[in-house]
């Protein structure tokens, strides 16, 4: 269980390139750029929020009983504290060198790991072979942000909000109806004619036309 | 002014790149990268400390390699112009995808390097702002109940440890 949580937290280094490769192989250039755009929007919104809410994360604040987290720390010594040295250096005013090769993510709220997981699920939705594994892996990853990433639970809620805003901005930029509008149309269409998928396709086509 | 036909053929293979740059999502990515780049530059210039950027030399190298790959794949496409054999068509398909990936890679590398930089600068700004907000008087008034926010919201985690 602990190993699965740690693996899912680190799975982003595999799942992101695999999804990118899938888009390349399928010749889906637009989806590849959408993936990048969502990751960028998520990062930018996260940075703006981080400006107002820098914090050391849960392991430092709550100082859990070492026995309760010993298995996480034994299997991955950086569990819950991977970002801490960098963050404390900045807070202490000792930041003098920024090293691209060694820098870690230091954002607590919202969890960028969580945002990436949600983006991967969202972008994999058109590839059936990847969608279900990605859904499973990234949902476990969302859970693992607390014990492995050292995030607070509210950070995951923040991830969902940032993800939703990123998708809304991307849809607006591309002139697409919003995700909620598409769902409403799909539900309305499903009631009158055939599948929800057809209704969404008709809605998008009519909007584009 | 006449253009050498080889150059004209070579430039024609840049059409896919041009088409890519016209996609709204690509423009969004370029815009976001420009914003992050500008903020990083302002942040470094305005930072109240001397910041050494280590290993950033890798950035121009990576961009050069990717740009060279784009030019090379355009050259290959030009050479295979009109060849309908399956090996040639396979190479054309691979080259086009390679071009797409390199273009994406160039934008992504610049964006995420700048975002990493901004992350540290944002933490500096945030901590300074928090320290200012969390003056002793504010915390005292919060503890005495005269503040609208509960003390736990106002006392930074590091001061409670």
Image (spheres, coloured by chain):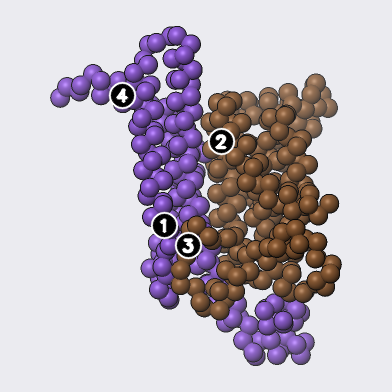
Chain colours: A brown, B purple
Is mark 1 in CB contact (under 8 Å) with mark 4? no
Above or below residue B158? Residue B90 is above
Above or below residue A207? Residue A81 is below
Q: CA distance from mark 3 to mark 2?
A: 28 Å
Q: CA distance from mark 3 to mark 4?
A: 39 Å
Q: CA distance from mark 1 to mark 4?
A: 33 Å
Query: Where in the figure is residue B67, as x and y percent of width and height?
Result: 37, 38
- Say whether residue B22 is visible: no
Q: Residue at x 46, y 72 (%)?
A: A96
Q: CA distance from mark 1 to mark 3?
A: 7 Å
User: Which mark, by number, is residue A99?
Assistant: 3
Chain of the residue displaying label 3: A
Q: Earlier in the sequence, mark 1 or mark 4?
A: 4
Tell if the residue under mark 3 belongs to the same chain as the one under mark 4.
no
Chain of the residue displaying label 2: A
Q: Which residue is mark 2?
A: A32
Between B79 and B112, the residue placed more toward the observer is: B79
Q: Which residue is mark 1?
A: B56
Q: Residue at x 38, y 55 (%)?
A: B57
Q: CA distance from mark 2 to mark 1?
A: 26 Å
Query: Where in the figure is residue B151, as x and y percent of width and height?
Result: 75, 82
SS category of the residue bearing label 2: helix
User: Which mark, by number, is residue B10?
Assistant: 4
- Residue A68 is left or right of residue A133, and the answer is right
């Amino acid at each position: 269980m602990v190993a699965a949580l740690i693996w899912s937290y680190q799975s982003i280094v595999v799942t992101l390139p695999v999804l990118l490769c899938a888009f390349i192989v399928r010749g889906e250039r637009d989806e590849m750029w959408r993936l990048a755009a969502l990751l960028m929007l998520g990062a930018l919104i996260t940075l703006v929020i981080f400006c107002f809410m820098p914090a050391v994360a849960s392991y430092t604040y709550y100082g859990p009983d070492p026995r309760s987290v010993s298995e996480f720390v034994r299997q991955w010594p950086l569990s819950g504290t991977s970002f801490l040295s960098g963050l404390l250096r900045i807070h202490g005013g000792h930041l003098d060198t920024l090293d691209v090769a060694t820098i870690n993510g230091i954002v607590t709220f919202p969890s960028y790991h969580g945002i990436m997981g949600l983006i991967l699920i969202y972008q994999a939705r058109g590839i059936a072979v990847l969608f279900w594994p990605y859904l499973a892996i990234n949902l476990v990853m969302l859970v693992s942000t607390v014990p492995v990433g050292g995030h607070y639970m509210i950070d995951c809620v923040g991830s969902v909000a940032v993800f939703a805003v990123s998708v809304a901005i991307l849809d607006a930029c591309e002139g697409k109806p919003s995700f909620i509008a598409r769902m409403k149309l799909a539900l309305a269409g499903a009631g009158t004619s055939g599948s929800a998928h057809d209704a969404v396709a008709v809605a998008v086509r009519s909007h584009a036309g | 002014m006449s253009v050498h036909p080889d150059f004209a053929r070579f430039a024609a293979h840049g059409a896919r790149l041009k088409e890519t740059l016209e996609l709204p999502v690509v423009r969004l990515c370029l815009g976001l990268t420009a914003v992050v780049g500008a903020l990083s530059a302002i942040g470094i210039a305005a930072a109240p400390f001397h910041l050494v950027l280590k290993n950033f030399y890798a950035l121009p190298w990576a961009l050069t390699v990717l740009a060279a790959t784009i030019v090379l794949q355009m050259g290959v496409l030009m050479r295979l112009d009109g060849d309908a054999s399956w090996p040639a068509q396979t190479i054309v398909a691979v080259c086009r995808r390679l071009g797409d990936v390199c273009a994406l890679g160039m934008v992504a590398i610049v964006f995420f390097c700048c975002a990493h930089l901004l992350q540290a600068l944002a933490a500096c700004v945030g901590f300074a702002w928090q320290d200012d907000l969390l003056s002793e008087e504010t915390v005292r008034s919060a503890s005495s109940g005269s503040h609208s926010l509960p003390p736990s919201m106002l006392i930074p985690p590091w001061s409670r440890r």
